[in-house]
Image (cartoon, rainbow, N blue to C red):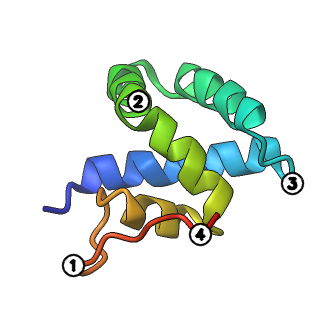
Amino acid sequence: MDNPVECSLCKYVVAYVDAVIQTNKSEAAIDSALEKVCTILPHALNHSCVVFVDTYGPVLVEYIAAYATPGEVCAALKVCQNGTEQRTPRI
């Protein structure tokens, strides 16, 4: 089921990581950006962000390296509506 808050949070986190790492899609660069992203959100969203990153962290690293857009990453995680099939990263 589509959760608009989780979907928006996912897109924000992925867009932030993309902006920070730019072309350096190494696991270390993505991990570093994921550690920082929740600290810049308003306090009300901080806990949700930490839970999201803790829940999806390892998969986020894979998907951010494999997919081009926040929409694709979040659809692959199934936090945003994308039809019925789950996509796996092309590595």
Instruction: Please tell me whether mark 4 or mark 1 is closer to you in this view.
Output: 4
Residue, x 57% and y 49% (percent of image)? 62
Q: Name the amino acid type tagged 1.
A: Thr
Local SS, label 4: loop
Camera sees residue 43: yes
Q: Earlier in the sequence, mark 3 or mark 1?
A: 3
Tell me the residue that label 3 is attached to: 23
Kind of residue at disc 4 = Arg
Which labelled disc corresponds to residue 90? 4
Q: Position of residue 26 (x, y in %)?
A: 78, 41
Q: Select label 1 or label 2 by which is in front.
A: 1
Q: On residue 72, which mark appears? A: none
Which residue is pictured at 86% across the width and 54% down the height?
A: 23
Task: Give whichever of discs 4 and 2 has the lower sequence position.
Answer: 2
- Dot 3 surroundings within 10 Å: few (below 14), some, or many (20 or more)? few
Question: Disc 2 marks which residue?
Answer: 49
User: Where is mark 1, residue-wise?
Assistant: 84
**Other-residue count near label 2 (Cα within 10 Å), few / some / many at <14 / 14–19 / ≥20:** many
- Nearest-to-viewer mark from 4 and 2: 4
Quadrant in which residue 30 is drawn: top right
The 10 Å Cα crowd at callout 1, few under 14, some 14 to 19, many 20 or more, is: few
Structural distance between the alpha carbons of marks 3 and 4: 17 Å
